[in-house]
Image: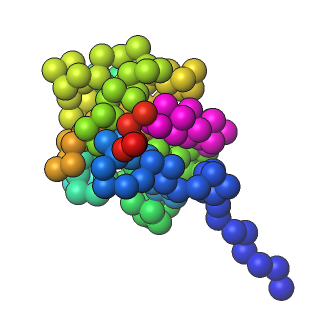
C-alpha cells in the first residue's frame, strides 16, 4: 500500500523565523498551504456577479489594485476580469467545488493555483522600510493603505503585495511563486538583520 504524498512548504529547509525576539522591529513568517484560486469572469454580467457574491459572502473587488475581505477569505483584484481568492488552509478545494456549481452555465474560468504559490509575511514597525530596500513602490500608508494590493517586483521576484494594519504595526503579505520563495526569503532575512536588537 503506497503512502500518500507528504506536503512540504517551499521554505521547509530554510527555517521558520530568522528575525526573532520581542525587540526586533521586523518579523518574517510564512503562511503555507492556503487555498489559492484564480477566477476569471465578466463583472458586467449580473448572473456572474450574483453567483460569486452568494458563494463568497460579499462582492468581488472591482476597483483596480484593491482587496476585499469576507471573513477568512481574501479576494485580490488582478485585472478587470481576474481575481485571486485566498482561503484558509484546507478550504480551497471545497470553495472551488462550490463556485463551479454556482457558476454552471455562466462563462467563467477557475483554476486552483495553491500548489504553485505561497505567502510570506513581513510585519513590525520597520516592515515597510525593509521592503522599500528592494521595491520601487511607495509603501507609506498615504500611498499604499490597507485594502490595496499591487503586482510588483521585490528583489527581482514577481509578488502580489498587500498591506494589513495590526496592533504590532503594519503587516505586508507577499504572494510569491513557489520557485522564488526560498530566494526571496533569504533576501528579506539578510535585509532584516539591521532591525534586530544589538
Quadrant of the snapshot with the C terminus: top left
Residue 186 versus residue 12 in the image, above or below: above
> x%, y% of residue 152?
45, 21
Residue 178 versus residue 78 in the image, above or below: below
- Residue 41 or 19: which is nearer the viewer? 19
Residue 192 falls in image quadrant: top left
Query: Is residue 76 shown left or right of residue 9?
Result: left
- Per the rendered image, the range of residues in magenta is 178-193
- Residue 168 or 176: which is nearer the viewer? 168
Residue lying at 40% horizontally and 27% vertically, measured from the top left: 131
Query: Is residue 138 shown left or right of residue 187?
Result: left
Q: How is the image coloured?
A: rainbow
Query: Is residue 63 shown left or right of residue 198?
Result: left
Q: Is residue 190 magenta?
A: yes
> x%, y% of residue 98?
40, 60
Quadrant of the snapshot with the N terminus: bottom right
Q: Is residue 159 magenta?
A: no
Q: Residue furthest front?
A: 198
Q: Residue furthest bottom?
A: 1
Residue lying at 30% horizontally and 16% vertically, measured from the top left: 138
Our reading of the magenta stretch's main secondary structure is: helix
Residue 175 versus residue 97 in the image, above or below: above
- Residue 138 or 100: which is nearer the viewer? 138
Residue lying at 49% horizontally and 24% vertically, measured from the top left: 154
Amino acid at each position: 500500500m503506497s503512502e500518500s504524498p507528504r506536503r512540504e512548504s517551499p521554505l521547509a529547509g530554510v527555517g521558520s523565523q530568522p528575525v526573532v525576539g520581542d525587540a526586533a522591529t521586523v518579523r518574517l513568517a510564512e503562511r503555507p498551504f492556503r487555498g489559492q484560486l484564480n477566477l476569471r469572469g465578466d463583472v458586467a454580467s449580473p448572473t456572474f456577479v450574483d453567483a460569486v457574491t452568494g458563494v463568497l459572502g460579499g462582492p468581488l473587488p472591482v476597483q483596480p489594485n484593491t482587496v476585499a475581505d469576507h471573513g477568512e477569505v481574501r479576494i485580490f483584484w488582478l485585472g478587470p476580469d481576474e481575481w485571486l481568492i485566498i482561503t484558509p488552509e484546507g478550504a480551497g478545494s471545497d470553495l472551488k467545488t462550490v463556485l463551479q456549481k454556482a457558476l454552471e452555465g455562466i462563462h467563467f474560468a477557475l483554476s486552483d493555483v495553491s500548489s504553485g504559490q505561497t505567502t510570506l509575511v513581513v510585519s513590525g514597525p520597520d516592515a515597510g522600510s525593509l521592503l522599500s530596500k528592494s521595491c520601487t513602490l511607495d509603501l507609506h500608508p498615504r500611498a499604499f493603505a490597507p485594502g490595496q494590493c499591487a503586482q510588483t517586483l521585490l528583489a527581482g521576484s514577481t509578488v502580489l503585495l498587500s498591506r494589513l494594519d495590526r496592533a504590532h504595526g503594519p503587516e505586508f503579505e507577499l504572494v510569491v511563486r513557489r520557485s522564488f520563495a526560498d530566494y526571496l526569503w533569504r533576501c528579506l532575512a539578510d535585509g532584516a538583520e539591521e532591525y534586530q536588537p544589538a
